[in-house]
Amino acid sequence: MTSQAERIRPLQPERTYTMADLVHAMGEKVDAAGKIKIISALTMATTLHATERRESGAPFVQHPLAAALYLLSLGYSDVPTLVGTLTHDIPENTMAFGNPRAISHAQWMENICLGFSKGFDAQTADIAIALQRPKVNNIDVYTKEQADALFAAKLEDGPVEAVMAKLAERLHNARTLEYLSIAKQRLIVRETEKVLFPIFTRAIKAYPAEAKYLMDEMRKALAKAKSSWGELIAEIDRH
């Protein structure tokens, strides 16, 4: 949790979105069959993330929902990507596909593949797999460094649509860094700049306008966060 000292300045509530916002954003961009899948994905995420909260206090599902809305606002309407975006935190956060720290990474991936293939389709399953961050389990993942390397490799080698989903969800995280401690902010900024940005460039060839916009907006959000660190530390010192 963010320390009391780092909450001297009151924060505005995080903007929240609803199912109605998602339906409106889909409009005519998504056909009827696609809308059913996307609404099902949000319903699934809302149910499985029901007990989770973000650092801001907002329901956790606001994060994947905001990310999906970012994509739709750009006219990006690929259904598997939107489903993958809405559900990307379910495997890691809810244990719906097994505990990744208690079973092998290979088994966890197989569970996710089977679950998403059955619930949605094979393309969505491929996106879901690429978005999952391995956990240390002392079976086939032994260190955090190994887990981080596996994650980067999966995202780099996976479907470019998974990169688009990651772009959107990381942009939302970047825009809401103010709710985190400076230490957590720095970790996210460092990973984004050093690890993810080189991978994000993959998306520019396939989706040049959308990927460039998301990356530019992310740079702005990260720069804003970094500029606030010195100001916040100075304010803490005054107290």
Image (cartoon, rainbow, N blue to C red):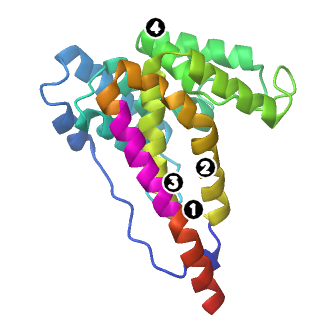
**Lower position in the chain sequence, tag 2 or tag 3:** 3
- Name the N-terminal-most of marks 1 and 2: 1
Q: Give the range drawn in magenta.
A: 211-225
- Read off the residue under disc 4: 122
Query: In the figure, 92 relative to 182: above or below?
Result: above
Do callouts 2 and 3 mark residues in contact (Cβ within 8 Å)? no
Using the numbered discs, state the Cα–Cα distance from disc 1 to disc 3 in whole angstroms: 13 Å
Residue annotated with mark 3? 53
Please give the name of the residue rendered at 38% of the width and 47% of the height, measured from the top-left corner. 217
| SS at circle 4 | helix
Q: Look at label 3 and name its amino acid.
A: Arg
Query: Image point 65% across, 72% down: which residue?
Result: 3
Residue 46 in which image quadrant: top left
Q: Which residue is drawn at 37% across and 39% down?
A: 214
Q: Which mark is residue 180?
A: 1
Q: Main secondary structure of the magenta part?
A: helix
Which residue is identified by label 2? Answer: 188
Going from the N terminus, do you reach mark 4 or mark 2 first?
Answer: 4
Q: Which of marks 4 and 3 is in front?
A: 4
